[in-house]
């Protein structure tokens, strides 16, 4: 079946009431049928609900749908995208290990992966996303993950997923792709060799800025991968914290099994059933929305291209853009989602545009049906010194747009008035 259909129907069998919408199982715990049943669930002899920190029937529907539309074997939902990234990485590393990180990722991933987990003894080594061969020189036998974004926020760079996957496979290293901005409707990184996909569901999957959420999707075949690998012994050795359980000995996808049994159990960044339900509603319209976001953004980008006050316009859907070939190769029908960036002369001009727009709200989010305008230098990247900002392409005149679902003529008129003011 196609992704549009799966996003609406997969993973839900109507309950005894015939409920057509997925019910919200707003509960913390579940009654066991007997003492033996309880014991069997804890020892994985039987599978079922134990406690909502570990699993929940509403969240399970969200997970089943996300796994299916990403082309993975299982999914695990978390309370935020940040939690999903933290779990995906810490499922692989221990103190003394290193990870290889794209130079073009979300600000929260930079602070988490370069700074916060550095205090746990994990080193991040940075490669140039525009030249995946720069990964090679960074690999050693303590390298445990390669992390990048398929369509990066805020740089709007397109990753060469095949090239990164090939290097990861050559060295037997797990590659993790953050597919938040492109969404599973435009590209499935697993089909291009990625091992793990992570999402912030708070953005395009939610689509209306209604709920925070995250997800980890793992590919099929990781049991065989880990079994033959000396890089990740903790998947093949008894887990002392779980009565000597060996993850690759069980008939389940070992990556997400370990995240659930060890990391969710111990750290507990679980989604609320209500947020899972909200994201299920959103998934039903994701295919329509991503098409419209892409269509509107292309129209807005074409308008900006012709405006005399705009320079360094970046939208991969434009023919002259340096990522256009990669976008056409990887993204469905060359659609490029809703992010655009461009520069105006300086900070004063940029702030003037932000303050003059009426339809675009000054908000630090993306993927909302309502259009958003951001000045990264003074907000999302404020904590980074100006010279460092410049190195990663954040200038004081830079403006980022998240183009929403309004009529594109209205959006263009609003931007035109603001730029001409
Ligand atoms: C927003 C974002 C995140 C973090 O997600 P939250 O749900 O806000 O925690 C991670 N990656 C990308 C690409 C994002 O845009």
Image (tube, rainbow, N blue to C red):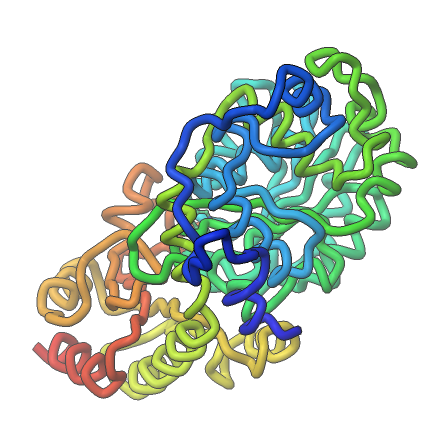
Say which quadrant the N terminus sits in. bottom right
Picture quadrant of residue 49: top right
Q: Nearer the viewer, residue 181 or 242?
A: 242
Position in image of residue 249 (x %, y %) = 86, 30
Position in image of residue 358 (x %, y %) = 11, 70
| Residue at the (46%, 59%) spot, across then down | 18
Q: Is residue 35 above or below residue 271?
A: above
Q: Is residue 153 above or below residue 113?
A: below
Left or right: 13 in relation to 419: right
Q: Is residue 204 visible?
A: no
Q: Nearer the viewer, residue 186 or 156?
A: 186
Position in image of residue 386 (x %, y %) = 32, 45
List the single residue furthest toward the right. 228
Position in image of residue 421 (x %, y %) = 7, 77
Left or right: 179 in relation to 282: right
Left or right: 200 in relation to 1: left
| Residue at the (58%, 77%) spot, across then down | 332
Number of marks drawn? 0
Q: Nearer the viewer, residue 76 or 172?
A: 76
Left or right: 131 in relation to 405: right
Q: Is residue 197 above or below residue 188?
A: above
Q: Is residue 41 visible?
A: yes
| Residue at the (39%, 61%) spot, across then down | 282
| Residue at the (30%, 71%) spot, across then down | 404
Q: Is residue 33 above or below residue 349?
A: above
Picture quadrant of residue 403: bottom left
Q: Nearer the viewer, residue 237 or 277?
A: 277
């Amino acid at each position: 079946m196609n992704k549009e259909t799966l996003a609406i129907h997969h993973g839900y069998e109507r309950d005894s009431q015939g409920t057509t919408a997925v019910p919200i199982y707003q509960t913390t715990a579940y009654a066991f049928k007997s003492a033996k049943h309880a014991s069997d669930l804890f020892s994985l002899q039987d599978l079922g609900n134990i406690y909502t920190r570990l699993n929940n029937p509403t969240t399970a529907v969200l997970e089943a749908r996300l796994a299916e539309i990403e082309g993975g074997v299982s999914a695990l939902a978390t309370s935020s995208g940040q939690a999903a990234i933290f779990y995906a990485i810490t499922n692989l590393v221990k103190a003394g290990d290193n990870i290889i990180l794209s130079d073009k990722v979300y600000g929260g991933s930079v602070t988490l992966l370069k700074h916060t987990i550095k205090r746990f003894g994990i080193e991040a080594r940075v490669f140039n996303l525009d030249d995946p061969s720069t990964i090679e020189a960074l690999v050693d036998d303590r390298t445990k993950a390669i992390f990048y974004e398929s369509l990066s926020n805020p740089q709007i760079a397109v990753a060469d997923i095949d090239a990164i996957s090939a290097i990861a496979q050559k060295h037997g290293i797990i590659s993790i792709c953050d597919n938040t901005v492109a969404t599973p409707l435009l590209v499935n990184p697993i089909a291009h060799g990625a091992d793990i996909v992570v999402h912030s569901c708070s953005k395009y999957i939610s689509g209306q800025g209604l709920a925070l959420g995250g997800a980890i999707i793992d590919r099929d075949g990781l049991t065989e991968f880990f079994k033959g690998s000396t890089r990740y012994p903790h998947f093949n050795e008894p887990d002392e914290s779980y009565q000597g359980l060996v993850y690759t000995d069980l008939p389940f996808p070992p990556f997400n099994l370990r995240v659930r049994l060890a990391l969710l159990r111990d750290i507990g960044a679980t989604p609320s059933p209500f947020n899972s339900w909200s994201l299920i509603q959103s998934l039903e319209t994701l295919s329509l929305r991503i098409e419209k976001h892409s269509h509107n953004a292309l129209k807005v980008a074409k308008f900006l291209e012709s405006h005399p006050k705009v320079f360094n316009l970046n939208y991969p859907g434009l023919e002259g853009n340096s990522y256009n070939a990669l976008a056409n190769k990887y993204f469905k029908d060359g659609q490029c989602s809703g992010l655009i960036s461009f520069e105006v002369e300086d900070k004063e001009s940029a702030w003037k545009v932000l303050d003059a727009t009426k339809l675009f709200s000054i908000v630090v989010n993306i993927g909302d049906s309502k259009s958003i305008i951001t000045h990264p230098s003074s907000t999302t990247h404020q904590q980074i010194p100006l010279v460092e900002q410049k190195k990663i392409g954040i200038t004081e005149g830079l403006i980022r747009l998240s183009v929403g679902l309004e009529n594109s003529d209205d959006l263009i008129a609003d931007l035109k008035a603001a730029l001409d003011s």
